[in-house]
Amino acid sequence: MKWAFVDYENIGSLGKVDLSSYARVIVFLGAKQPKLDFTDTKYDRPINLVVIQLKAVQANNLDFHLAYYLGKFDSEAPAGVAFDVISNDGGFSPLIGHIKTSGRACKQVKIANTSLDTQKLIDSLMVRPKDKRPQKVISLRNHIASHLRIKGNEVAIQNQLNQLVSANLISLNADGVEYKK
């Protein structure tokens, strides 16, 4: 039996996770994330899903909550329950290692296809003439949210925007978005 602890702020969509392989799924939702995105995934049986919606926006707030509940459930769950921490954040590694020393099976599951999402976004922008691309930052953010199906996930949208800047495809200024290619 496995339980999942999902860092939703980090992965951006539950459609990337096979929820049916878990007896219990605990999803940690950031304060700026009003809803969950399951994409088009359908399940043939009910999913035992608990959502912990954070109220405050603060650095590492979600990580601290996830760590708290991981410790809490480690003391409450039967010994045979394995824990999967679903996050691309490497900061959980020491805690996972510590939990394993107590005898509980615990591992991190990373979602590998985030770079594919970035490439999909880049492709969608580059096939359009420059004058047809989003010209304002808010328009680009809306394009990212819509195209990658991450509407409402401000952290994931910002991460994608940062990826475009890091890849030197765009620059942001007071006037809006400047495309370099």
Image (cartoon, rainbow, N blue to C red):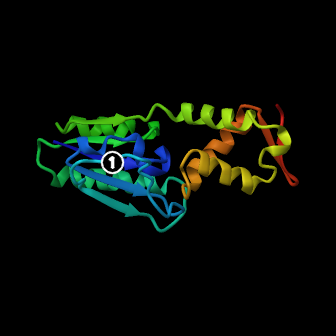
Q: In the shown orientation, is residue 96 left or right of residue 167?
A: left
Q: Which of the two residues, 72 or 132, is positioned nearer the viewer here?
A: 132
Question: x%, y% of residue 33?
Answer: 51, 60
Q: Position of residue 165 (x, y in %)?
A: 73, 38
Instruction: Name the residue: 77% across, 32% down.
Output: 168
**Residue shown at 49% from the left, 64% from the top:** 34
Q: Is residue 117 above or below residue 74?
A: above
Using residue 52 as the reference point, say whether residue 49 is left or right of it: left
34, 91: nearer the viewer: 34
Q: Residue furthest right?
A: 175
* Amino acid type indicated by mark 1: Lys
30 or 113, nearer to the observer: 113
The residue wearing badge 1 is 42
Is the C terminus in the top left, top right, bottom left or bottom right quadrant?
A: top right
The percent coordinates of residue 70 (x first, y second) are 29, 50
Side of 44 where 29 appears, left or right: right
Residue 102, position in %: x, y?
A: 19, 39
Left/right of residue 181 with respect to residue 109 in the rendered view: right
**Which residue lies at the image location 34% right of the left edge and 42% below the top edge?**
85
Mark 1 Cα-neighbour bin, 10 Å: few <14, some 14–19, many ≥20: few
At 19% from the left and 48% from the top, the residue drawn is: 23
Helix, strand or loop at label 1? It is: loop
Looking at the rendering, in which quadrant would you find the N terminus? Answer: top left
